Amino acid sequence: MLDYLIVGSGLAGISFAEFALKNNKTILVLDNKSQNSSRVAGGLYNPVILKRFSEVWNAQDQLVLMNDFYNQIEDKLKEKFNFKMPVLRKFFSIEEQNNWFAASDKKNLAPFLSTKLISKKYDSIDSPYDYGEVLHTGYVDTALLLDTYKAYLIENNLLLEESFHSSYIEFLDSGIQYKNIQPRHIIFAEGFGMHNNPFFNYLPLDGTKGELFIIKAPGLNLDVIVNTSVFILPLGDDLFKVGATYNWQDKSAEPTEEGKTELLERIKEIITCDFEIVKHFAGIRPTVSDRRPLLGTHEVYKSIHILNGLGTRGVMLGPAMAKALYDHIENNIPLDREADIKRFHKRYLKSLISDRL
């Protein structure tokens, strides 16, 4: 008998795997490499929605748990993934400055927004109205994290690189049978692949395509992350990750000329130096219309669970949501109503009616 069969090895899947292993549970992870959003993600963590100067949902709690989580994984795997780095919001007007200071007076935002303007001039970026600094920010090298964790899973015989087929599930009096595996629980952490999951495909996972660049720009000298209409993240050796686009119609994970043109236009609005595109990549973010994750247990099959909908903030949300789901399963701790899939109970009932017609 296996404690957990985890379907998916992105940020959601490995976060749950780590909490289970830390609690001495037996696991097996299945992954077919069909979903790449965690791997190509920007990896930034930032407790403030800078477009509206508002707090990210449950940001304080997520940051505390996130830092502990990544620190422990770094110690375990002997690799560095979590890089603290300031995020500077470039201001385009005096009005934006005023909006920043008004936001920094709010109780929930005061811990995250510095009240001191940053007037430092960075090569090849024109900034007549200076910058505001967001505190407690940085980025996680998600590709390195996933590759290293996958190697750890393989080394310990905890990963099967194959597709999951729901038709092989049998619900027995003694539990679940999947092929030759008998798990107590199945955790679906499939990202946008959830649409092919008959147990949870009634949930409103939209999927938002994002495209990013790695550029080489010797004339751009940054030691911070700059956030404007795009983010510019220094990687070293004159390389920068830049993104991202948001496309709600295209559900393919392939880079497009449309996305390339959009990113090029945005970059040229911000930096004045020459640059070359080193890499152009894309992925489908697992986003939900109400901007909340999808956590919970199936309405009928109580041994089947979902961990999805981390959207654009998977680095922050992944550890917190994985812990919440684990505690819910093992310790019967209620899920946050805003994240619990029970909020879509009516959609589930409609799906049952549709299936019967």
Image (cartoon, rainbow, N blue to C red):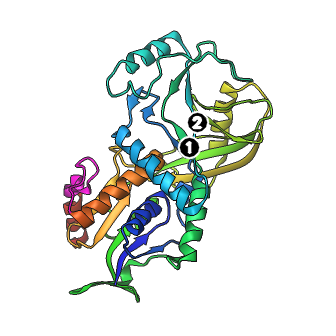
Q: Magenta span covers which residues?
A: 332-346
- Numbered circle sitting on residue 298: none
Front-lying residue, 203 or 141: 141
Residue 57 in the image: above or below residue 293: above
From the top left corner, tell me how far across and down residue 221 is, in percent: 74, 29
Q: CA distance from mark 1 to mark 2?
A: 7 Å
Q: Give the secondary structure at mark 1.
A: strand
Q: Main secondary structure of the magenta part?
A: loop
Q: Residues within 10 Å of mark 1 (few under 14, many from 20)?
A: many
**Contact, CB < 8 Å: mark 1 with mark 2?**
yes
Q: Is residue 204 visible?
A: no
> Is residue 333 part of the magenta span, yes or no?
yes
| Residue type marked 1 | Tyr
Q: Which mark is residue 139?
A: 1
Residue 85: numbered disc: 2
Tell whether position 252 is magenta: no
